[in-house]
Structure formats: structure tokens, C-alpha cells
Image (cartoon, rainbow, N blue to C red):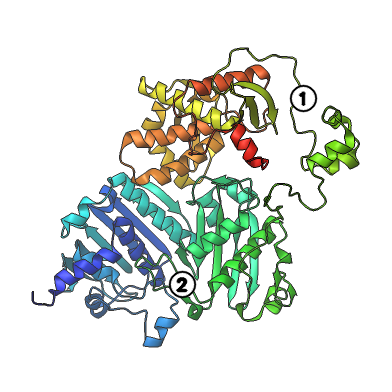
Amino acid sequence: MSIRLLPAVTADRIAAGEVVERPAAAVKELVENALDAGATRIAVELEGGGIDRLLVEDNGAGMDATDLALCVDRHATSKLPDEDTLFRIATLGFRGEALPSIGAVSRLRITSRPPGGAAHAIEVEAGRKGEVSPAAGAPGTRVEVRDLFHATPARRKFLRQPRTEAEQAVEAVRRLAAAWPEVGFRVSVEDRVALDLPPADRAGRIAALLGEEFAGAALPVRGEWPELRLEGLAGPATLSRASMTEQHLVVNRRPVRDPVLRAALRAAYRDVMVSGRHPVAALFLEVDPASVDVNVHPMKAELRFREPNAVRGAVIVALRRALGIGAAELPGRGGSTGLGSGGLAETVRGWNLPAPVPSPWVPPRPAAPGWAPAGTALAEPVLAAHGPGFAEALPTLPPPVQAGLPLAPGRLAAPREEEAPAAEGPLGRPLAQLLDTYVLAEAPDGALVLVDQHAAHERLTQEKLHAQLVAGGVRSQPLLLPAVVDMAPARAARLLDQTEDLARLGLEIEGFGPGAVLVRSLPALLGAPEPGPLLNDLADGLAEWAGTEALEARLDAAIARLACHGSVRAGRRLNPAEMAALLRAMEATPRAATCSHGRPTFLRLDQAALERMFGRR
């Protein structure tokens, strides 16, 4: 087999696959070009999800006829005046690949006019470049892309439905809009305005993107060190989402989805946010361009920091300081560290920041039978000292003796007058409720069963909702007074695009102005949950399921979200009859061993397990 050089058109189409993987990527590249050109107004139009047609117009610097002829040639760029600039990139674009890549797989027309000059246009079809010709146009640049991927039909087959592709494109513009608040953005999808953001300051732009709920509760985040400055807003631990879609991370005005920064967010909230939930935040980092490499990902969505541990540590410090959980006492070289121009900057020279943040101390697990934490009495000596009646007398023992026990008193539910039904099943009869969260039961064979009441009821609710859906639709309960839920415009639009599917789930909503949703009815099985958290959770889910075309899969995922909001919560006291009813319902429900999220609903400790735990075998 002989080696040959690929034709230029074929090579361009192959290279285009890395830069332009879907319409959203083309929109992102074109909007970045507009921002680099100094535009203050950018308009985007999408038809057929951007596959049939996408248009990006700006009022930036524009191009003359000579530059217009060069801009569609591969690796032609105005953003790297010399080779040294490659190591200090200060623009969003720099490779000179976007326009030729788009032109290689579509029908491309660019019209541009510099201030005080004449307008010209050029066309490129499937990589074949036309001549520059005079045209009519306002100052700035107008880029129209038609029939995206018509020259690479195999790639076009992998695209999602137009609605999904459009949503991805709108999200790409939203992330750029967060980084450039002084620029006005407008996005239209099928002649419907999906995003309209006038120029604003940073706080105003974040409020428009993340909603008034976040803006009203957000905590300011600030920190300054050598080569790094951090500002932004972070939501309190009580404000969380089911996905990371509401995390805006910006480095040198470039929106990124960088794993180092996301790991820092997770670590900062680790001790104050429940597992599986994600914080809401908008963080803006400014670093020396020489200390970060943006040329490590085809979509420039990830970075490579020269000192990743330092960046991660700085973000964690600033976030934990904002959350008020003691990050200022991080141990480091030279003593404790503090934020501000005179704190960490003076203490930790040359980026020597500690990466991990210490967590609250947790006693180690027993290494062998007979182990106990220092200062804690073992059970057998305590029993010997107090005699056979010690267990019965435990609730009335004086505080000094109780303080020496490994379990704190007072967390076992008090005996109740109600008696549980006598009938028993495999999960046995309820004995007590622990920590207002777990039901302790005794199985017929004597084993102990511990049930997570919320996880168990979540599964029961999900199966009931699914059964109603299969039977024709989830029964709804109209609200006496419709509820208005304020949320970020993009989240509201995401829900309103699915009104028909949500109605099948018993949730009737309609638009109520920009960034607001009117709730008319909720699924009857859910009781009376707060509509706000439920709708926000569903909006997060819709973002995660954007690539799921099967209606059944989307509805099943939505049912799981609804079930979580309509279930018995941890912390609710149950009487014996309610506990017994929960156990019997679990025994009669498919898939009752796990909740909607895959976590176990109960644990079973038989004789063998107990003997192993106590070192008897």
C-alpha cells in the first residue's frame, strides 16, 4: 500500500470534525470571533436547530476585501502577531481554523464592512472558495451558514433532533454572555426569542442568567494572589442543583468546563452539601496568560494550568471563606493562610498553595475486636461496673456516665401508644424509628432490618407514578391558586418546551413572562410539594436528558425526579402503623431494594453479620 497526500478539501473536512462537531460549536466559534472583533451587540438566528441555517451578526471591527479573502484560509489569523504570542494567548480565538472548518462542511457566506469602508462578501461551499465581491451591509460582520454537514453526511446522521441542537447552541451563547456582560446578546430559534440580554454589569448579567433566587442568596467570592485574581458569586449550601449546568467558570474571559475548577467546587462544598447535589456558582479567574495553556482541547473548553494545585487550592480557600467554614486556617508554609492582598499572597510565595482542604475529624474505623476511640469505655467494662440493670437505667443515667458511651442518648424514638399490625412479611415488624430517618425492624428469622424511609418511599412513589403513566397519564391535582415560580429564563424555556410531556405527568405549566412559570396543577400523588424546587430539579434533568431522544426514557427520568419531591422526608416522625405500612408496601413493590437514584433502601443484618461485626467469627 503506497502513501499519498490527501487532497486539501478532504484534509479540511477531516480537520473540521474536531472544531465543528455540532451547530453549537459553530455558533460558539462565530460568537467568539465577534467578541474578539470588539462587538458590543451580537445576534444569532437558528433554523432547524442550526443545521438548516444559522446566522451570526455583530457590530465589530469588520474586515476589508483583503482580510475577507484570507479569513477562510486555514491557519490565517489576526490574533497571533508573532510566534511568542502563542504562549501568552489573550483572545478567545487564535488558531485560524473556525471559518475554514465551517466552510468545509457547509454553504458559508460572509459579509463584512469595516468602519468607514465598503462592504464585501465571500462564499465558500464544501471547501471551495469563491471570489470576494462588493455587497451591501452595515458596519460589522454577518456570517450565514446553511446546510451544515451536507458535505459530510455521515456526521450529519449523528446529530440530535433540531430542538436539542438548538438548546445546545443557546447554552453556548449563555456561557459566553456570562463572561462578557458588557455585550448585548440576542438569540432567536425558529423566529422565537430564546435569549435576550442587554448590556449590563456582571451582577446584573448573572442575575439574568441564573435567576433572582440565586442573585438574592448569592455570596460574594473574592481572593487575590500572585498571578491569580478570583471574583464571583456562589450560592449557599442550601441552594443546590441536580446537575452542574448552573456552574459558570470563566478564566481570562473564556468560559470553560475545566476539571480542576470543578473539582475545587466539589471540594469546597463537600462538608456542607448532600452527596449527589451540585452548587450554583459564577466564578471569574484572571491569571497571567503565560501560566495557562488554552491549546489543549479542540473546543478550548479545558485548560492546563502551570500550577493546577495552586489554582485548585486558591479557589477552595476563597469559596470556603465565603461559605464561612473556616478555610482561612489552612495550614501552609509559613503558618496559617488568609485571604486578601496581604494574606495568602504574602504567606505563600510562588504559588505554593496547599491543594487539599482539611475536613472535620472522623474517628478511624475499628481495626480489631476490642478497639475503642481514645477516652471511650468498652461496653463490657461499663456493664460490669453497673450490673445487669444498666441497660434499663440508661435513659436516667447522669450526664458524665452517658458522655463516655460511643452513642449519644436521646435519638431513639420514644415508645408510642399506637400498636403496629400483627401481620409480618419478609421485612418483619417495626421496632423503632432511629434519628427520625431510619425504621428499625426485626425480620421473622431474627435479623435486624434498617430501612431508609425517604429512599423507600421514593421508590414506592415512583412505581405508582409509572403505573398511572402506563394506564394513560398521571392524575393531576389542580392548585386552588396557581403558583408563579421565578427562575432563570433559560431554565423556564427548557420547561416550557416540554409542556406536553409534563402534562402527561400531571404537571400543568405555562409561561408567565420572561423567567417565570405558572403552575396550574401538580401530580396528585405528590401531595403538596413546593413547586419551585420541583421545577428547578426538572429543569436540571431536562438539561441532562437533552441527548435522549426516546420519549419513554425522558418520562421515566422525569418520574424519578417527581418521586423524590413527593416522598416522606428524612426527619419526619412515623408511628408504628405508618412504619408497618411502609414495610408491607415495600414487600409488594418491584425494585424496592433501591431508590430512584440507585441507592439501597434497606440494610439487613443477620446473625452472621452481627457476629462478624462483634468479632465473634
Please tell me how crowded label 1 is: few (under 14), some (14-19), or many (20+) other residues with Cα within 10 Å: few
**In the image, residue 345 above or below residue 508:** below
The residue that label 1 is drawn on is 414
The residue that label 2 is drawn on is 304
| Cα separation between marks 2 and 1 | 57 Å
123 or 426: nearer the eye?
426
Evaluate whether residue 520 shows in this view. no
Local secondary structure at mark 1: loop
Judge left or right: residue 21 versus residue 237. Answer: left
Q: Residue at x 82, y 30 (%)?
A: 391
Kind of residue sitting beneath label 2: Arg
Badge nearest the viewer, 2 or 1 = 1
Q: Earlier in the sequence, mark 2 or mark 1?
A: 2
Q: Residue at x 64, y 36 (%)?
A: 610
Please report contact status of discs 2 and 1: CB closer than 8 Å, yes or no. Answer: no
Please tell me how crowded label 2 is: few (under 14), some (14-19), or many (20+) other residues with Cα within 10 Å: some
**In the image, residue 503 above or below residue 264:** above
Q: x, y percentage for residue 542?
A: 42, 42
Q: x, y percentage for residue 258?
A: 47, 63
* Quadrant hosting residue 126: bottom left
**In the image, residue 479 above or below residue 279:** above
Q: x, y percentage for residue 587?
A: 50, 22
349 or 574: nearer the eye?
574
Q: Residue furthest left?
A: 1
Kind of residue sitting beneath label 1: Ala
Q: Residue furthest front?
A: 617
Q: Residue at x 33, y 68 (%)?
A: 140
Quadrant holding the N terminus: bottom left
Evaluate whether residue 251 shows in this view. yes
Q: Residue at x 17, y 67 (%)?
A: 124
Judge left or right: residue 473 versus residue 208. Answer: left
Local secondary structure at mark 2: strand
